[in-house]
Image (tube, helix red, strand yellow):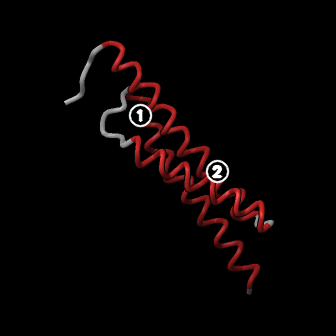
Amino acid sequence: MREIVAFVFGLALLGNAALFVPQAIAVWRKKSDEGVSLVTFGGFCVLQVIGVIHGVYERDNSLIVGLGASFLTCGTVTLLTIVYRIRRLRTGRQSA
């Protein structure tokens, strides 16, 4: 039973990672940081890195893979937001 719960937990973490993909696609397509909270996504990234580190210490592959995938997708949103925010601020355009 423990293995089943661990497997389902790992799938849920991968599902969590997939939830960031639409936001990453939207930011990339719009080429804009408008409507994206850098504090929120940056905070998510920090929490995911802490979770991966915990997974390494606990030798929990579900945490390592699942939160690593979440960090990759959430980190993409965060990085794109930073890039487009810097670009917007350099050109002097302010979002409403």
Look at 48% across and 39% down and name the residue there: 77
- Local SS, label 2: helix
- Residue 83 is labelled as none
The percent coordinates of residue 78 (x first, y second) are 49, 38
Look at 50% across and 52% down and name the residue there: 44
The percent coordinates of residue 34 (x first, y second) are 31, 33
Relative to residue 24, is residue 16 depicted above or below?
Answer: below
The percent coordinates of residue 11 (x first, y second) are 64, 65
Measure the alpha-carbon separation of dots 2 and 1.
Answer: 19 Å
Badge 2 is on which residue? 69
Which is more toward the observer, 3 or 92? Answer: 92
- Local SS, label 1: helix
The percent coordinates of residue 79 (x first, y second) are 51, 33
Amino acid bearing label 2: Ala
Relative to residue 54, is residue 25 depicted above or below?
Answer: above
Relative to residue 96, is residue 55 depicted above or below?
Answer: below
Look at 56% across and 44% down and name the residue there: 73
Marks 2 and 1 close (CB-CB < 8 Å): no
Q: Quadrant of the C terminus?
A: top left
Badge 1 is on which residue? 27
Q: Going by the picture, which residue comes out furthest to the right?
A: 59
Q: Going by the picture, which residue comes out furthest to the top?
A: 91
